[in-house]
Structure formats: C-alpha cells, structure tokens
Image (cartoon, rainbow, N blue to C red):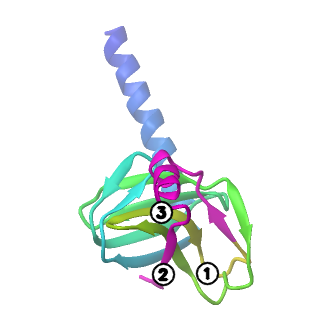
C-alpha cells in the first residue's frame, strides 16, 4: 500500500512539473529541418519541429510531430543584432554531420548558444573550422 501511494505521489509530482513547464512556454516557433542533426548526445531525424522557449531565456523544448520532446539548456547567451529580425536555428556543419549550436527566438536581442558537444568538438578538430547552416524559425 505504501509503495502504491509513493508511486501515485511521484506520478502526480511529475505531471505537475511537466505540466507547469508546458504552461510556461513563452515563444513557440516551427522549423522544417531538412537533415538529420545532433543535439547533445541525441540524433534527431529530418522533419518539422516545434521549438519552445520556456520560463527562462536559456531553456528550450524541441518537439517533433510524433510527440517526442527533448529539453535543451542553452546557458550561454550570444549577443547579436539579428536575433529579433532573423529567428533561426544555427547548426555547425561538416560533411553529412549537423550539430545544433544556437537558438535565436523572435523578440529577443540575444541568441542562446548550446554547450559544445563531443561531436561538435570532433567536427572542429577534423577540419579546423566547420561551416554554419541556418534554418529559419516561423510561427506555427
């Protein structure tokens, strides 16, 4: 009985936590990404994604149309004049590898830079400097 009660409490707490995170979404944009790409240790397939900026300027949720979601922390602000006029996702690119590196939401002055992942470091080491590919964000 005690174990069942603990599971119910855990489920209720998690529902409240993730439900409140959903309600805190401030910016919600879509992107049609034409290539498979890396985010941290995950590889996501090409397709249509929704990018939501949550309660803080550095917390995002990336969701596909199949109901899969990934929470991304981009703790490093990147100053730039093009953020407001040019909402986009920036990917470091080398060969057939793409790594999400920056998120620029509309209405913000600064973009958010993700921590450099192992795959991004490997790409940079391999060729010295990787190119950057931008994918526009549009209102859903």
How busy is the neighbourhood of tag 2: few (under 14 within 10 Å), some, or many (20 plus)?
Answer: many
Residues at marks 1 and 2, CA–CA distance in whole angstroms: 8 Å
Looking at the image, the residue that sits furthest to the top is 2
**135 horizontally vs 97: left or right:** right
Q: Are marks 1 and 2 in contact (CB under 8 Å)?
A: yes
Question: Compared to 77, does 17 lie above or below?
Answer: above
According to the picture, the residue beneath numbered tag 1 turns out to be 106
Q: Earlier in the sequence, mark 1 or mark 3?
A: 3
According to the picture, the residue beneath numbered tag 2 turns out to be 137
State the mark number for residue 22: none
Q: Are marks 1 and 3 in contact (CB under 8 Å)?
A: no
The residue lying toward the viewer, choosing from 140 and 112, is: 112
**36 horizontally vs 103: left or right:** left
How busy is the neighbourhood of tag 1: few (under 14 within 10 Å), some, or many (20 plus)?
Answer: many
Residue at image point 30% right, 77% down: 34
Image position, residue 122 (x, y; %): 47, 50
Looking at the rendered image, the quarter that the N terminus falls into is top left
Disc 3, SS = strand
Disc 1, SS = loop
Residue at image point 36% right, 49% down: 42
The residue lying toward the viewer, choosing from 107 and 45, is: 45
Image position, residue 103 (x, y; %): 57, 69
How busy is the neighbourhood of tag 3: few (under 14 within 10 Å), some, or many (20 plus)?
Answer: many
Q: Quadrant of residue 140?
A: bottom left
Looking at the image, the residue that sits furthest to the front is 127
Q: Which residues are the magenta region?
A: 111-140
Residue at image point 60% right, 87% down: 86
Choose mark 1 or mark 3, whichever is in front.
3
Image position, residue 64 (x, y; %): 31, 65
Q: Earlier in the sequence, mark 2 or mark 3?
A: 3
According to the picture, the residue beneath numbered tag 3 turns out to be 100
Residues at marks 2 and 3, CA–CA distance in whole angstroms: 14 Å
């Amino acid at each position: 009985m005690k174990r069942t009660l603990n599971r119910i409490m855990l489920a209720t707490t998690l529902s409240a936590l993730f439900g409140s995170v959903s309600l805190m979404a401030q910016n919600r944009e879509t992107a049609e990404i034409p290539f498979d790409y890396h985010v941290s240790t995950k590889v996501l397939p090409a397709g249509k994604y929704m990018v939501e900026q949550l309660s803080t300027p550095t917390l995002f949720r990336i969701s596909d149309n199949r109901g899969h979601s990934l929470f991304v922390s981009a703790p490093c602000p990147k100053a730039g004049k093009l953020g407001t006029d040019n909402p986009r996702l920036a990917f470091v690119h080398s060969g057939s590898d793409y790594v999400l590196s920056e998120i620029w939401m509309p209405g913000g002055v600064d973009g958010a830079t993700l921590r450099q992942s192992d795959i991004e470091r490997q790409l940079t080491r391999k060729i010295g400097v990787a190119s950057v590919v931008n994918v526009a964000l549009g209102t859903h």
